[in-house]
Amino acid sequence: MKLKKITIAIDGHSSTGKSTMAKTLAKRIGYAYVDTGAMYRAVTLFALRNKLIKGDKVDEKALKEHLKHGDIVITFRPTKDGKSVTVLNGRNVERYIRSMRVSNVVSVIAAIGFVRKEMVRQQQAMGKDKGLVMDGRDIGTVVFPDAEMKVFATASAQVRAQRRFDELRSKGDTTTTFDEVLANVTERDRIDSTRKESPLRQAEDAVVLDNSNLTFEQQDEWLYQLYLERAKC
Ligand code: DC
């Protein structure tokens, strides 16, 4: 089968395993993978390190200047074991951007219009030659509205909370309760879908992937078949 190079946009709710599915698909079909959440996290880390965030107040004027002057350069570097790490101004920051310190304020940074504008510009530049899988919240709606393949990943709040709860337990957290995790998942859904700038919404031409009751294998195969259908000449 002759296949053309396409753009694949994967959006959806938090804790639906978007990045795992996007990474797996990209590897299988030899495409680049871009984690746009990591980009918002890297800007957040820069802001924290430069003391531009106090509580949930951001020094927007200073942050805007830094972005304008190109002080925040975000790239992705492949590792020897076939993974990819996030690089901020030449330094691997993968570990730091996943910390609770960053997670707690990233939604504030991601809600700022000029930050989104700059991230979208960089994401569009990364995808100009197609052949990539990008995951986030606004990829099919704002970044690549013409993407040939758009997926909107979802699962019930109960299922997503259970996944996060199991993950926390496996990392040694024995205090957070399931109800707390469920409340957090529900609250993040609310913030993501009601914010003013690029709220999370399903693109009209996106295909919904509800993975509440799917195994990883079933999900990966579903995505691969959709890719073949969309990429065939
Ligand atoms: O997917 P994640 O948890 O790493 O995303 C981090 C934050 O960035 C989260 O608050 C959602 C936001 N985000 C966004 O607003 N737009 C994107 N394209 C990707 C992430």
Image (tube, grey):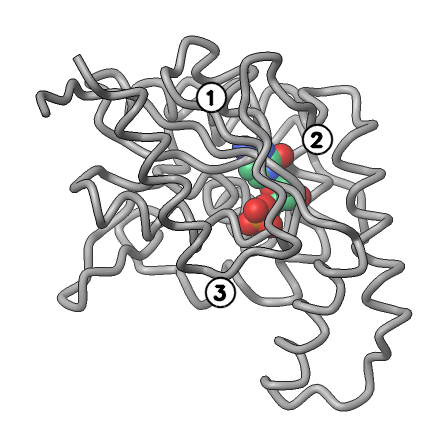
Q: Is mark 2 within 8 Å of ligand 1?
A: yes
Q: Position of residue 155 (x, y in %)?
A: 69, 48
Disc number at residue 96?
A: 3
- Specify whether residue 46 is in view: yes
* Residue count near mark 2 (Cα–Cα under 10 Å), binned few <14, some 14–19, many ≥20: some
Q: Residue at x 50, y 25 (%)?
A: 139
Q: How far apart are labels 2 and 3 at the CA level?
A: 21 Å
Quadrant housing the C terminus: top left
For mark 2, give the secondary structure. Answer: loop
Q: Which residue is labeled 2 in the image?
A: 111
Q: Of label 3 and label 1, which has the lower sequence position?
A: 3
| Marks 3 and 1, how far apart at CA | 22 Å
- Residue topped by disc 1: 120
Q: Which amino acid, by three-letter code, is at mark 3?
A: Tyr
Q: Residue at x 68, y 30 (%)?
A: 60
**Label 3: how many residues lie within 10 Å, few (<14), some (14-19) or many (20+)?**
some
